Structure formats: C-alpha cells, structure tokens
Image (cartoon, rainbow, N blue to C red):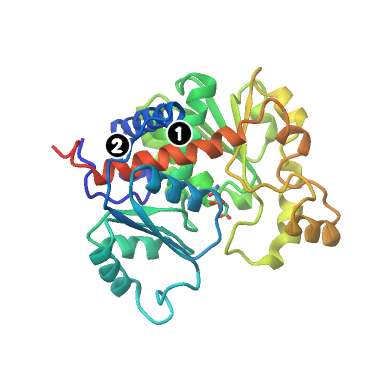
Amino acid sequence: MNFKGRDFLRILDFSEEELRFMLDAAKRFKEMKHAGENHKYFPGKNIAVLFEKTSTRTRCAFEVAGYDLGMNVTYLDPTGSQMGHKESVADTARVLARFYDGIEFRGFKQETVDDLAKYADVPVWNGLTDYCHPTQALADFMTIEEKLGGFSGKTLAFVGDTRNNVANSLMAMAAKMGMNFIACGPNELHPSEDIVNACRPIAEKNGATITITDDINALNDTADAIYTDIWLSMGEDKEKWGERIDQLQSYRVTMEMINKAKPGCIFLHCLPSFHDLNTSVARDVHEKFGVEEMEVTNEVFESEHSVVFDEAENRLHTIKAVMYLTLTDEYNQ
Ligand code: CP
Ligand code: NVA
C-alpha cells in the first residue's frame, strides 16, 4: 500500500485492496470518534478546501475531519479566491501547494480538479465534479456494509438520473467491491458507454454484474439497497426542471418500490433531497409543476428503511480516512 502524496480524484484510480483499506481505516476513525479518543495526528499541517459550488456535508466533513486530525483549515467559497477569473487553475495550484499540505476541490468540471492535481505537488481530494463524487461513494459503501453486512451477492440499485456524478462513482465502487449494480432510469439518462465499459470488466472480475435498464420492475425481489439523487444536479440549467420531471416522475422511490424489493431493503440518498416542500427550490418547483415530492416520497425518506443520516455521518469518517492515508508516512512503503 502506498497512499502518501496521492490524489483522490476518482474511484477507478484505486485498486480493490486500496479501497478496502480506506473503508477499514474509516471504520477505525469512526470508533475513535465515538469513543472520544484523540486522533490529532497532524498538528501544524494546513489544508485548503475550495468550493466553486455550494455544500453542507462535504465542506463540513472536510473541515471537521481536518480539525479532528489536528490540522488548520482554510475555506475558500466560490467568490473567495482569484482562481478561474483572475488566475489560472495551474497558477493557483502551484501557489496553494506552497502553503498547504492538501487541497480539497469541488467544482463544475472534472478537468479542473485534474489540472489542480497535475500542478499541485500535494494531495488533491475531489469533493464533487460534474463527472463524479468519489468521497460520497466511499461513505455510501461504508454505510451499506454496516447495514447489510457485506457486498458480495447483494444488489445496489440507483434509480433516476443514472448518468450523474453520484451514480458514476457508485457504479465504479460497486464494481470494485463486487456488488451487483443496477442503473434504472429512462434511456436518455443512462450512464455513458465509457463508464460502463470501464466498470463492467472490473465487476465481472469481482463476481458482480452491472445492469442498465429503464424498467423499475428490475428491482423486484432483487435490490438490497435502493439509492436515488436529485433530478437536476448543481450546474445544470434550471430551465430543465420541467423536462426532468417528465422524464423521471415514474422513477420516484416509493414505498411500493421498497416493498417489492428484497426484504430489509435499505434506502440511500447522498442528500440534499427534495422529499417535501420545506426548501425554497422544492416550493418553486411545486408552484411551477405541481410536484410535491420529487426523487423520493417523504414516507420512504422518513421510514425505517432510510439510512440517509448514517450515510451523511459516514462522510466524516471516510473523508478523514482519505486525508489521513494520503498525508501520513505510515503506509509509505
Ligand atoms: N452529499 C453531498 O455532497 O452534500 P453537500 O452538497 O451538502 O456537500
Ligand atoms: N448530483 C448532485 C449531488 C449533490 C451532492 C449534484 O451534483 O448536485
């Protein structure tokens, strides 16, 4: 295992063993956190967390993980630096690498985080791009393992906008962990061939399958875990809400869908979620299109099947594991 100095840009950059090791490290960090054990391993280190898009979980998880590890954290919001408008990503990366021991970046384009990583000679951690959301997938698989006891022979179904960033990382993680994966949504929102072609041989090698379908009945008696995400991601044109609702309405996660899946089926969502009218976006959409619940019903979201807040907590432990492993000398052999 050699993690030191490595970037965390996408799931497929890491081997099965390395991802397994990260999940195990996250488990240990969770135990330490719950036991109140000090784990300030990096006093004096500094990290920067850069956000071109808004965030609650990812920002707070990186900040708290940084503090828990004894580090100092600088947060730069979408308008808080020169990057992109007055200074290139390449120049920004080379400057920040002189100040910081690691850099988190959330942005619009995967190329930006790739560029940042290319020019910064410290670890760069991807906190979400248009293409993927790798730290999310780590937390999701930690949660699945906690709730289902393992991955082999089990099936994760992602329902809805199956070509989005979260779905891409989940497919990659399922392939690596040997868990069957179903992407279930309308044909025009199916994952790109590139990502399916990259993941399928890995899944096969690990004894798992990848199914791409527009038929929600594919989940019946099959899905051990059902996952969905919002129908319009950050950075997409807001004018598309109407079209997306038409495309995805029949893919809403309902109690009927959960009841037809495997007994004990769990429900996952990266959050934030539009499961009620308690947000301004949901109220706007409701006013324009008359939809009260979007990707998941409130009944499912609030049910005993739902593990969404465990999943949110696990963002902290998994992000801490990624930062720890890429900064420590301990596994640098
Ligand atoms: N799931 C997730 O990434 O949430 P935030 O957008 O709040 O960071
Ligand atoms: N697909 C969503 C995920 C948010 C965590 C988005 O990109 O907005």
User: Judging from the image, what secondary structure is the residue with disc 2 in?
Assistant: loop
Which amino acid type corresponds to the residue marked 2 in the rendered image?
Ser
Instruction: Tell me what residue is drawn at x 16 percent, y 40 percent.
Output: 332
Where residue 150 appears, as percent x and y from the top left, is 46, 21
Give the residue at x 29% y 74%: 91
Image height of 266 relative to 90, above or below:
above
Q: In front: 2, or 67?
A: 67
Badges 2 and 1: C-beta atoms under 8 Å apart?
Answer: no
Question: Which residue is at the far left?
Answer: 333
- The quarter of the picture where residue 98 lies is bottom left
Tell me residue 64's x, y (percent).
44, 46
Looking at the image, which residue is at 42% across and 73% down? Answer: 81
Q: Give the label on residue 174, or none.
A: 1
Q: Is mark 2 within 8 Å of ligand 1?
A: no
Q: Please give the name of the residue rendered at 61% of the width and 36% of the height, measured from the top-left corner.
A: 308
Residue 141 visible in rendering? yes
Q: Nearer the viewer, residue 167 or 115?
A: 115
Query: For the residue labelled by badge 1, is the local secondary structure a helix, a strand or a loop?
Result: helix
Sort mark 1 into few (<14), some (14-19) or many (20+) by Cα contacts within 10 Å: many
Question: Does label 1 point to a residue whose CB lies under 8 Å from ligand 2?
Answer: no
